Image (spheres, helix red, strand yellow):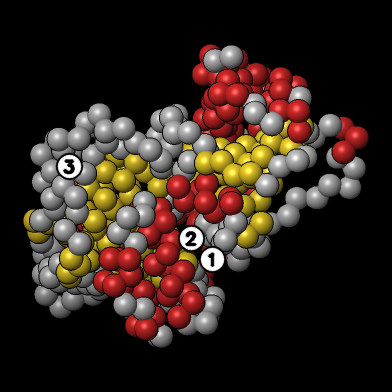
Amino acid sequence: MDGHSELPRLLTAAETAAPVEAVDVVAEDLLRRFGATRVSFLIVDLTGKAVVPLSTATPAEARVGQQADRIELFGSVYEQVVRTQQPYQQTTDESERVICPVTNRGDAIGLLELFLPAGHADPGQGVLDAVGAAAHALAYIVIANQRFTDLYTWGKRSRPLTLAAEIQHQLLPPSLTCEAAQFALCGNLEPSEDVSGDTFDYTLDRDTLHLSVTDPMGHHVEAALSATVLVSALRGARRQGAGLLEQVRQADQALADHGPPGHATGQLVRIDLHTGQAQLVNAGHPWPLRMRDGQVEEITLEVDPPFGLPLPVPHPYRVQELDLRPGDRLIMFTDGMLERGAEKVHLPALLKETRHLHPRETALTLTTAVLDAVGGHLEDDATVMCLDWHGPQETKRHVGSGADIQQASPRRTKR
């Protein structure tokens, strides 16, 4: 059976279902086609450290009293599949277990897990291909249907958010990860207990990759409102086709005119996907780090004033050239990664240790290390954006982290 040929049928079936039931269509289909005892979709939560069973299809008589639980990733087989983006297969006396990543363009959305009865000890490549194809379809189904329902957003949340945190999360890009032939990037935000308004953003045009990291003054709703004005001004100018200088000018003016008292630091980066030329504006923000050939160094930049800072004499912002070469890893971050106990984390050393990981895993490792260093009580948001630059010459790179259907054989274990 060609699993890939089932994709149009699965997508069509999901489109005819209600948004909250679209995932169940895929699960029920696998349950019916292969006589599975259970099929589950587990969504990765906002922290990136746990999965939540958002949909579990089992025979009707087995559903009584079933509850969805938050499952910690650390040390689990689920963590292995998310981190490696490789399917997993386990054979026991009772069943055959298959887990496939549900990922799109590097965004690890979740996992598709299927249990077959013991009689399917060797399900064959056709079944494995079908599960992989269903996982691929699920990524598109979730992306399409989350526009119409809160179900998927609810599943990603480990706890209720405060008003400030709700605003802050709405300012982040819909996907924290993006991967293309020329690059892979991911941002991660570990909010402080009081929420300090950190944000990061990116967008991909036909010719250009845009990145930004911003950090307003203050805490709680005041910081979230400053972030709203700042990010909205930056996005509005960018969507009008404005260059870097006009984007920062509008953001500076908007924060001065409409934001709560205070200012915000930030960095904006613009990379030409055809030439690799990179430019940056630094508005009072910590210097980024660059790893090249295994060595980590600070990129020392000219520092312009923060956004919204009243100055007796206007200070024009400057566009600076950013030396970015194929194979480089660029790390942009907020000062919450450096202060109030976080200085215990040696970021350059940790960058070297994680150099073989996907930016998705590196960003999570860095913010988690800072959170652990302060005993789980951040006084300031800790935010990281990690970019791997593969270069403009890469236009057809095979991406092995979910931007296309996985081709690798599953990892197998027997028990």
Q: What is the CA distance from the residue labelled 2 to the residue labelled 1?
A: 6 Å
Q: Which amino acid, by three-letter code, is at mark 3?
A: Gly
Query: Disc 2 marks which residue?
Result: 168
Name the residue located 74 percent from the left edge and 37 percent from the top edge: 95
Disc 2 on helix, strand or loop? Answer: helix
Disc 3 on helix, strand or loop? Answer: loop
Name the residue located 19 percent from the left edge and 54 percent from the top edge: 328
Q: What is the CA distance from the residue labelled 1 to the residue labelled 3?
A: 38 Å
Percent position of residue 229, x then y: 38, 59
Q: What is the CA distance from the residue labelled 2 to the residue labelled 3?
A: 32 Å
Report which quarter residue 399 is drawn in: top left
Question: Callout 3: few (<14), some (14-19), or many (20+) C-alpha neighbours within 10 Å?
Answer: many
Query: Disc 3 marks which residue?
Result: 391
Viewer-nearest of discs 2 and 3: 3
CB atoms of marks 1 and 3 within 8 Å: no
- Return the disc, 1 or 3, that comes first in the chain's sequence: 1
CB atoms of marks 2 and 1 within 8 Å: yes
What's the mark number on residue 164?
1
- Return the disc, 2 or 3, that comes first in the chain's sequence: 2
